[in-house]
Image (cartoon, helix red, strand yellow):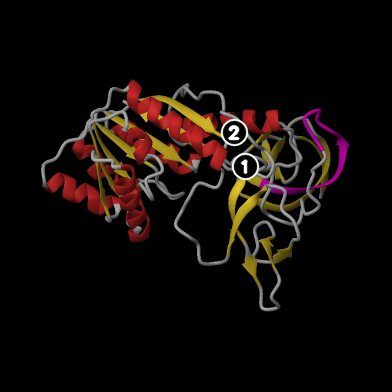
Amino acid sequence: MTINLKIEKLIYGGLGAGFVDRLPVFVPMTVPGDEVECEIVRKHKGYAEGRAIKIVAASPNRVTPKCEYVGSCGGCQWQHLDYATQILWKELILEEQLTRIGKIREPNVLPTIPSPKIWNYRGRVKLHRDDQGRSGFYAMGTNELVEIEDCLIAGKDCLRSGDEDPVFTQVNPAQNENLKALVAGIVKELKASKVLELYCGNGNLTFPIAKAVDFVEAGDADKRAIGNAKATAQELAVKNVEFLGLSASAMLRAFLKAGKKADTVLVDPPRDGCKDILSDLVKIAPKNIIYVSCNPSTLARDIKTLSESGYKLRSSQPIDMFPQTFHIESVSVLI
């Protein structure tokens, strides 16, 4: 079945969306404002998947992708959008997720902080290898290898790792400096004194906030990351931080058992979010929660739970760590 479709919005996952008789049709590689000839390739309850056969009229925000692998490699979903459109829709998608999933009416989503670099920004990439010794990235939505010779979002000195990841570090070093300054500024503005930090990794956010507070108790299940954090603390002579090699749930249980208090909790969980620890987190009853997220869907789900426990979303600040992709990093403050 082929239809003419006007693309009206973008959704989380990077697809464009148009509507036929109020049924949303999701189409890859499209831009709001595009008019496309679209083939319906699959129907589901409540929505359909489409494929653009022809761009009948292009959106003014459409650009020609710079990379020859766009359309085959699954790494960049938004190279066909100009950058101003990318960061606008990251703000709008975050707002939509907080409203629809989080049930937050009129969430205070701030304009996206743009990345200092939108090309060659990645400090590390993960390459996959097949049985023939070829290396590259997977095609979108599959494990089919796309062999590549050059990646336009990888930095000049980018660390290229295989299937065994090194200790987690932020992939966008320049923007990571802005992230650290943002979180440290929020901690200072909140007049935090004692901070409990969960999912601290190697201390990426710990050391910046330690300068603004009396004490930080920080933990992560990755023992190697904690070892690196302790070494850095010793090297920098940081005395007001205690690093513990514990999971977030174990940290909270130990914190509660000891009867400790923290006025602020900082969380920076993986994409799955914090669902399993929220019941213990609210028992600590921190005055403030700072939630650093790389997934607006799980963020919105968790904020809904925290709202039901009496917390209010003060603001959510998207910060673009991943130009040319649909991925959305954000820092939310709950009070």
Instruction: Report the residue at 39% width, 36% height from top.
Output: 291
Apparent side of residue 76 relative to residue 165 in the rendered image (left or right): right
Quadrant of the drawing holding the C terminus: top left
Describe the element under mark 1 as helix, strand or loop.
loop
- Prevailing secondary structure of the magenta residues: strand
Do the CB atoms of the residues marked 1 and 2 lie less than 8 Å apart? yes
The answer to which quarter of the image holds residue 160 is bottom right
Which stretch is magenta?
Answer: 48-63
Instruction: Report the residue at 34% width, 28% height from top.
Output: 187
Residue 310 x, y percent position in the rendering? 27, 28
* Upstream in sequence: badge 1 or badge 2: 2
Circle on res. 37: none
Judge whether residue 207 can be spotted in this image: yes
The residue indicated by pointer 1 is 326
The answer to which quarter of the image holds residue 323 is top right
Q: Nearer the viewer, residue 251 or 10?
A: 251
The residue indicated by pointer 2 is 90
The answer to which quarter of the image holds residue 196 is top left
